[in-house]
Amino acid sequence: MTTRLYTHELSVEHITPPGHPERPDRIRALDKVFAEEQFSDLARVDAPEADEALLELAHPASHLKAIKSRIPETGLAVVDADTSASPKSWETALHVCGAAIDAVDAVFNRQASNAFVSMRPPGHHAEKTTAMGFCLVNNIAIAARYAQQSHDCERVAIVDWDVHHGNGTQDIFYDDPTVLFASTHQMPLYPGTGALNETGVGNVFNAPLRAGDDGDTFKQAFIERVLPAVDEFHPDLVLISAGFDAHYKDPLANLELTGSDFDWATGKLMDLADKHCNGRIVSLLEGGYDLEGLAESAAAHVNRLMSA
């Protein structure tokens, strides 16, 4: 089997204000790196559009209606202090969710070993009833609920290594023992959540890092907290919130990771997926705002996925 790469031209049509870090150039940088010869064996998929009703797996219909009402016909609209929408934003978000859902189908139907959704906007800050942090809807939460609904998937493990804590994912699953959420992130940092004592119903495992921490400290957090939690959980599916803003070049944080650290973490999660769920991994792009650091890190991540 192969690794699927999901993309869509609308990923560059979600427009943000000038100077905003979550910008279309992020996707252009990834498209360029994935055009290289080393990625020629990727199974490339044009992301389908999700049925809007499936977004209700993670968000109330009233909330989704409110977000749609903010989408402008022209120009930009403010969703929150650092989140904006443009005319194509809702359609784009539907394609990101569609990619995640299709990827879940692909790994359960054995059409692919694993998958990476190379699309924006990101999603892990979107809480059940709050769009925030560059995120409109929580793509990975929708994918997790879809897996449970459509594939009799009893236990989903979500691992988030974005440098910012995935408060939205934690919010949605905080009281749900069927979904494990494990996160490494810099703290203190936006959004201010992710402390060790935030444990849900025994299903939340936060591993906060400090400014200046490097790959060795990141690996230690994985070895001591994240990997044992996932292993003990025996997941039927592993989902990765793959933010690459812990890279040392990133302008929004102060960790010191390199592409090789993301390669290592990917390999460790693949080992657990092989052990517990026939290798099923779906990874979704989250943050990563230095274009060189983003490209280096995503390339390392996907190259490792392709080794399955």
Image (cartoon, helix red, strand yellow):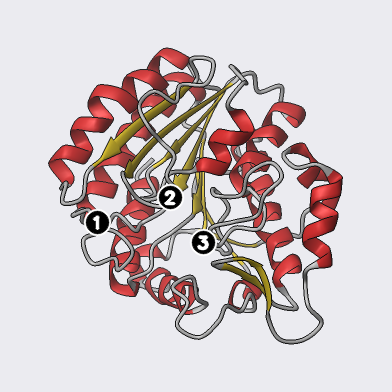
- Answer yes or no: is residue 51 visible: no
Quadrant of residue 185 within the rendered picture? top left
- Please tell me the numbered disc located at residue 259: 1
Q: Is mark 3 on a helix, strand or loop?
A: loop
* Percent position of residue 171, x then y: 59, 35
N-terminal of the pair, mark 2 or mark 1, is 2
Q: What element carries label 1?
A: helix
State if disc 1 and disc 2 touch (CB < 8 Å).
Answer: no
Amino acid marked by disc 2: Ala
- Answer yes or no: is residue 198 visible: yes
* Percent position of residue 46, x then y: 65, 65
Q: Residue at x 65, y 54 (%)?
A: 131
Quadrant of residue 216 within the rendered picture? top left
Q: Residue at x 76, y 31 (%)?
A: 150
Q: How far apart are marks 3 and 1 (CA)?
A: 16 Å
Location of mark 3 (residue):
118
The answer to whether residue 94 is left or right of residue 46 is right
Location of mark 2 (residue):
242
The answer to whether residue 128 is left or right of residue 232 is right
N-terminal of the pair, mark 3 or mark 1, is 3
The answer to whether residue 1 is left or right of residue 215 is right
N-terminal of the pair, mark 2 or mark 3, is 3
Name the image quarter holding the C terminus.
Answer: top left
Question: In the image shown, does 120 or 115 lie closer to the viewer?
Answer: 120
Question: In the image shown, does 32 or 28 lie closer to the viewer?
Answer: 28
Q: Eyeballing the image, is 277 above or below 268? A: above
Q: Nearer the viewer, mark 2 or mark 3?
A: 2
